[in-house]
Amino acid sequence: MTQRSILLAALAAPALLLGGCMGTDNRGLESVHQPVVAQRDFALDLATAGGRLAPGESRRLGGWMTAMHLGYGDRVAIDEAGDAPPAARDQIAAVVASYGLLLSDDRPVTPAPVTPGTLRIVVSRMHASVPGCPDWSRDSSHEFEGSTSSNYGCAVNTNLAAMIARPADLVRGVDHDPITDPALTTKAIEAYRKKPATGAAALEQVSAKGAN
């Protein structure tokens, strides 16, 4: 081996070692890939007349919510809720209830002012995802720093983000109800205990005639 070849090999060795350690660094048991919750707001302005929704506005609201595929996890509120006429608010709450939801008392912040004589309905929808997954940026076959795979945690947290029905629970869990119903808490246990075991019945008589 010539002196030039030895010099090139000496220069390339550190680069190869560094190349094996490049990529996402997962030093602990908790993955660096965590679910991120993003929120989007959708608004619709409805006209009012005489303290109620104008004729046809309830049907327009229902059609808009159907197109939005409104469902569990969505939050529906009225901008400037304190100024909403009670009759109009009841009409909106009835439309929202037909989708299995309750009208929220929160007052969402929207960038544009509400036109006089109208009510703005805001649907807040959250979406959970895990940015950067899948991640195979680190070569685990050359691991000199005791780091786990760069893709560690991607499968579990991506599945969690995809399956959770209400992404807001990842930010803040549901508040504890101070009133506890023992019948409700033991319902699952009672159902498990009362269900007959699958092997309780007699074994089925099976004939071997006609078997190959």
Image: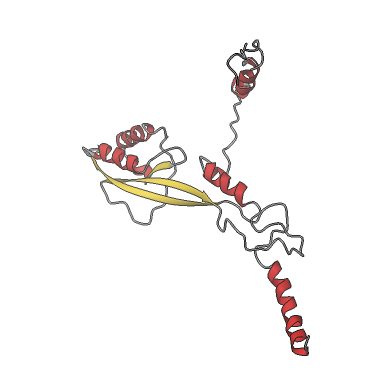
Closest to the observer: 105 or 15?
Answer: 15
Question: Residue 58 at x, y = what percent?
Answer: 27, 37
Question: Residue 101 at x, y = what percent?
Answer: 42, 34
Question: Residue 168 at x, y = what percent?
Answer: 52, 45
Closest to the observer: 2 or 94?
Answer: 2
Closest to the observer: 207 or 28?
Answer: 207
Quadrant location of residue 97?
top left
Query: What's the coloring here?
Result: secondary structure
Among all residues in the image, which is located at the extreme bottom?
3
Residue at left 28%, top 51%? 115
In the rendered view, tell whether residue 54 sits above or below residue 38.
Answer: above
Question: Residue 30 at x, y = what percent?
Answer: 69, 52
In the rendered view, tell whether residue 98 sits above or below residue 105.
Answer: above
In the rendered view, tell whether residue 175 sits above or below residue 28.
Answer: above
* Quadrant holding the C terminus: top right
Residue at left 44%, top 43%? 106
**Residue 203 falls left or right of residue 1:** left
* Quadrant holding the N terminus: bottom right
Residue at left 58%, top 37%? 175
Quadrant location of residue 149?
bottom right
